Image (cartoon, rainbow, N blue to C red):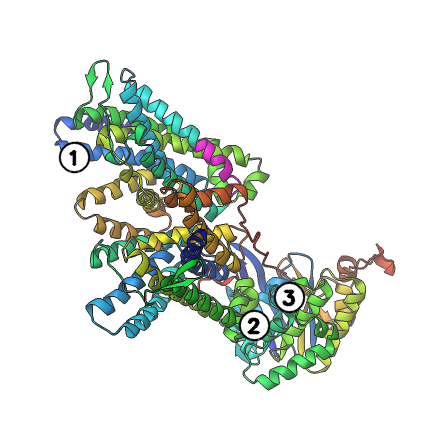
Amino acid sequence: MLEVEKVDTYYGKVQALKGVSLKVEEKDIVTLLGANGAGKTTTLRTISGLIPPAKGVIRFLGERIDNKSPEKIVRRGISHVPEGRDLFPDLTVDENLAMGAYTRKNRHEVQDSIARVFNSFSILKIRRKQHAGTLSGGEQQMLAIGRALMSNPRLILLDEPSLGLAPLLVNEIFKIIREINQEGTTILLVEQNANMALQVARYGYVLETGKVALQDQTERLLEDQHVRETYLGLKREGRKSSCFSR
Amino acid sequence: MVFFTRRRIIFLAGVGALFFLSPLILNRYTIFILNLFAIYALVSIGLNLVMGYTGQISAGHAGFLAIGAYFTAIMSTKMGWMPPIAVLVSAGLFTGIIGFLLGIPILRLKGFYIAMATLAFGVVVSEIILQWSSLTHGDDGFRVPRAILLGFVFDSDKKLFYLVQPITIGMILMAINIVRTRVGRAFLAIRQSETASQTMGIHLAKYKTSAFAVSAFYTGVAGGLFAYVITHISPDSFSLGVSIDFIAMIVIGGMGSILGSIIGAVILTGIQQVLSGLPEVQLLIFGVLLILFMIFMPRGISGMILDWRGRLRKGPLVEPASDEDPSRISNRRD
Amino acid sequence: MLLQVIVSGIATGCIYSLMALGLTLIYKSTEHVNFAQGEMAMISGFLAFTFFQFLRFPVALSLILSLLCSVLLGLLMERLLIRPAITAPHFNIFIITLGASIVMQSFAGLVWSYDQFPFPTLFPNKNIILGVVRLNTVTLGIIGTTGLLMLTLFLFFKYTKIGTAMRAVSQSQNAALLMGINVKRSFALTWAISGLVSGIAALLIAPVIFLSTRMGLVVINGFAAAILGGWGSIPGAVLGGIALGVLENVAPYYFPSQIRNIIPFAVLVGVLVIKPTGIIGEERRRRV
């Protein structure tokens, strides 16, 4: 469904992505792992069109999108939930969701979508008239995901949904991610919490300093020594090196 | 970089000699223009120190010019025995102190607010001069007494040439010196990124206020010279429009560059004199130039020259700060 | 007596509010400062005058045409001056608008000369006596029109899809892009609305202070008003404008009359020294 081929992306003079290639099949959950600064967020931003790639090709449903602006890419069916949520802080929950549906014309269908979002995230319904900036971290994450769903996307790019959330909420969010996927939406998930990501995804890529260092099915990645040490905090012989797994 | 090679020194000496002998053959008007070039070059350098180097927008520099001019005029009248150099230096120091005092509250402001504050400053100075007519003769204007040095009266443009030019050249050399030292580099660093400068140990407050002080000093001295050359000053010559002209000078000439300041001053003064009968057309051209340069050549003429020479850039003149988000629409060039 | 002065102060304040509003709209959505806001108003005023006086169009048509022109002026400025420099630092854009204001001022001076022209009032000039206060219909007209305009804009931004999208853009350009919002068009629209607001301000104030090419200096009052109310805040712009207008009208009562000229600058300096964030206070941080 999504093909990223040998993409180079620069921030000014600094090269953030070096020949990154990845594939996401339809209905799949694919995860992108890596340390801070490895290029995970940059990859998502390149896909959604926020940053134009210097080299390489990105194809979605067979058509090239690497030369398109974000507005057009959204209309093709890709929704991006940015790192840190990036909600509209002074707009209400309702308005944020409405903005998510900006590209859709049919008002009734939009209302249906809003109803469905409130179904999955009941807490948002209670807070629908509140400004997004006043919500708690977990509620904001739910709103961000809900907002992304409003455009009826075929593919959702999720950037670090667990960032700053308490463990209970993280479980909640990942449960929702699984449900969204089961209902037919493809997901490309960027996460620092490698543990959760590898459990929910089917296939994974590991980025290190802008390059794809490793890619495999997630069961195998969970067994991989390097992955275990670097991203799961597990020493050899399966003993944990710290109480918290990253 | 050995600037002063043997050949260069001889060349400069030759040029210098020609320059200083020129009033003997040039006509009065041309000499007058050369004097104006010098005066505005000093203003330009002053403004550049504050805007081009430390990045603090000043939309009120005409105020400093006015302070220097009126200080000189009043001093010369009340204490005519003082030699002109002393008068000019005190005018510069007085203006410099005011600049320093202005720089202090400005420290808390950023960007656009600084522009507004300095704009207000410029207008307030103008208004004070207008209202305090007992001291400044207000609207009527002030007749500036001629500068007298040991009995020698500077009563013609030719004679003023020998007052204005040496002082200007001396101050330009001083400025080049300042800019080359760590002070100058600190100024440039502050413009690029205040946060980064602080982490390198640059004491922001000290440098930013000193920039204002030195800038005001230069403009104050220029004001004094202006008073002597024009001989009759009035608040009109120091309006907001004049402050904007100064901004145009450094934008066109090149911000963050002494050479640019001089080029800008020469060009704008030249245009002003060529079109002296048509003030609206002057203004129109300044405005158009300002826009064109800011869009297409933000580094000004000196930036262009440096590009041609392919040298290392003298300073980061108008690059976006490194922590700006490249995906924001206003940072994209689609 | 004092009440009357305050009312006319409110009317003057409305004009400043409109100026401040135009400035704030542009700043909020694009973070650019438009120094040429006043000149945009001035040119609209002169165009209206040209339509009416020289081309002998009927009044209503002249007004509508001139407002259309002010919208166009806003769009043109955005397209020709701002977009080419869109990747440049805000400082550059500010200087560009500075240049634009000079160009517009001198252009107007060349075309229409620097004389002052009487401008026909939009409202019949009558006096109404309400108890102890004598109100002038022109004053009421200014306050009423401004109020109506503000209400319209409020409804537009709060309840229409485009208006909400524009608010979204001003809160996060990136997120807006990801919603499929055409941010560039949003900017253009902001400038268009800003131009319209300036045009209306011109039509309201020209009858009172006479049309002149130096009218553009009212932008400084606009800046003072916006900073007083809280730079970057729309309610601040409105509040600051009214406050400044009232201050300007009341001060000559207690101080020598020349003080009127210096009030905007005194306010500017005062606010920047005491509380730079103005009455309303700090503009909200953008990220969530």
Question: CA–CA distance between discs 2 and 1?
Answer: 63 Å
Question: CA–CA distance between discs 2 and 3?
Answer: 18 Å
Q: Is residue B100 magenta?
A: yes
Quarter of the image where one finds residue A125: bottom right
SS under mark 3: loop
Of the 4 image quadrants, the one containing the C terminus of chain B is bottom left
Residue range (magenta)? B99-109
Which secondary structure dominates the residues rendered in magenta?
A: helix
Res. A202 in view: no
Judge whether C241 appears above or below A182 on screen.
above
**Residue B100: x percent and y percent?**
46, 31
Name the amino acid type tagged 1: Thr
Name the amino acid type tagged 2: Met
**Residue B242: x percent and y percent?**
30, 42
Name the amino acid type tagged 3: His
Q: Which residue is mark 3?
A: A131
**Side of B327 relative to B50 (left or right):** right
Q: Which residue is mark 1?
A: B30
**Side of B38 relative to B50 (left or right):** left
Q: Are the numbered discs 1 and 3 placed on the same chain, yes or no?
A: no
**Side of A4 relative to A233 (left or right):** left
In this rendered view, identify the residue nearer to me: A13 or C16.
C16
SS under mark 2: loop
Please tell me the numbered disc located at residue C179. Answer: 2
Q: Chain of mark 1?
A: B
Q: Chain of mark 2?
A: C
